[in-house]
Amino acid sequence: MKPSLTLLALLVAGQAGLAGQVLAGVVSLRGDLPIPVTEPAPAPYKYVNDKENIPRNFEQQPPLVPHTNEKYAINLKENGCLECHMKGPEEDEAKSVEMSESHFLDRNGNKLDRPTGTRYFCNQCHVPQADAKPLVENSFQSAALK
Ligand code: HEC
Ligand code: HEC
């Protein structure tokens, strides 16, 4: 029995050493704080609000929102985004681009006269932008789109 116990002990020690090495490179974005400690929330970022469309990075990317979006409610009764992005007889003074056809097709491909349920919560896919430093450095390059 004794030799196999020693082997087990060696194996456990080996695994722990490996895990320790992997974790050694991980640095928490919160700094060296124990988990129960809370920090005051950082000041909110200001969203870009210039209405110029932001180039897309890859095909089928939901375009980024080039304006603030906090004041447009999306709930059971109203959807503020539709006031400008919904096709309709009323003129939209902001001259915003309409949602594409895809937003009016249900999952069976039927054409609806309102945005389909899966596209109702716009900010699930379309997000506003802030001029913020990336939290983690990365070498992302956008696909060359025509
Ligand atoms: C007061 C009118 C108005 C409202 C309300 C509004 N937008 Fe916009 N939106 C614009 C204008 C103007 C533009 C820039 C021109 C364009 O591309 O339509 C724009 C652009 C966009 C674009 C970029 C389109 C592209 O092809 O690059 C997205 C995505 C978008 N809005 C999403 C939203 C979402 C989501 C909401 C609700 C949270 C919203 N908008 C509410 C006026 C509006
Ligand atoms: C499930 C993800 C998703 C949701 C939810 C969604 N969209 Fe989109 N949206 C996309 C994608 C992907 C595209 C680009 C491809 C396309 O046009 O279908 C797009 C394109 C757009 C465009 C640009 C159209 C063009 O011709 O340039 C507008 C404007 C837009 N969406 C507005 C909205 C609004 C307003 C809502 C909420 C009512 C909404 N979207 C909900 C994914 C989504």
Image (cartoon, rainbow, N blue to C red):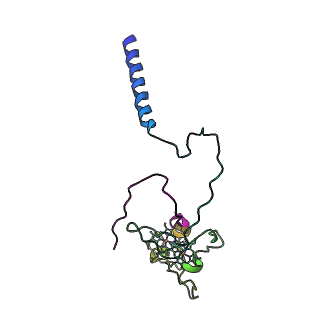
> Image check: 43 left or right of 17?
right
Question: In which quadrant of the rendered image does the C terminus lie?
Answer: bottom left
Residue 88 picture location, percent across and down: 55, 85
Whether residue 118 is visible to the viewer of this picture, yes or no, is: yes
Look at the magenta stretch and give its main secondary structure.
loop
Question: In which quadrant of the rendered image does the N terminus lie?
Answer: top left
* Total count of labels: 0
> Image check: 90 left or right of 14?
right
Residue 97 picture location, percent across and down: 49, 80
Residue 100 picture location, percent across and down: 46, 77
Residue 116 picture location, percent across and down: 52, 72
User: Which of the 4 image quarters holds residue 8?
Assistant: top left
Find the magenta span and give its range: 123-146
Is 24 magenta? The answer is: no
Q: Residue furthest top?
A: 2
Name the residue located 34 percent from the left edge and 71 percent from the top edge: 145
User: Which of the 4 image quarters holds residue 61?
Assistant: bottom left
- Position of residue 54 relative to residue 84, above or below, is above
Whether residue 1 is visible to the viewer of this picture, yes or no, is: no
- Position of residue 38 relative to residue 17, above or below, is below
> Image check: 113 left or right of 42?
left
Q: Nearer the viewer, residue 30 or 5?
A: 30
Q: Nearer the viewer, residue 131 or 90?
A: 131
Is 131 magenta? The answer is: yes
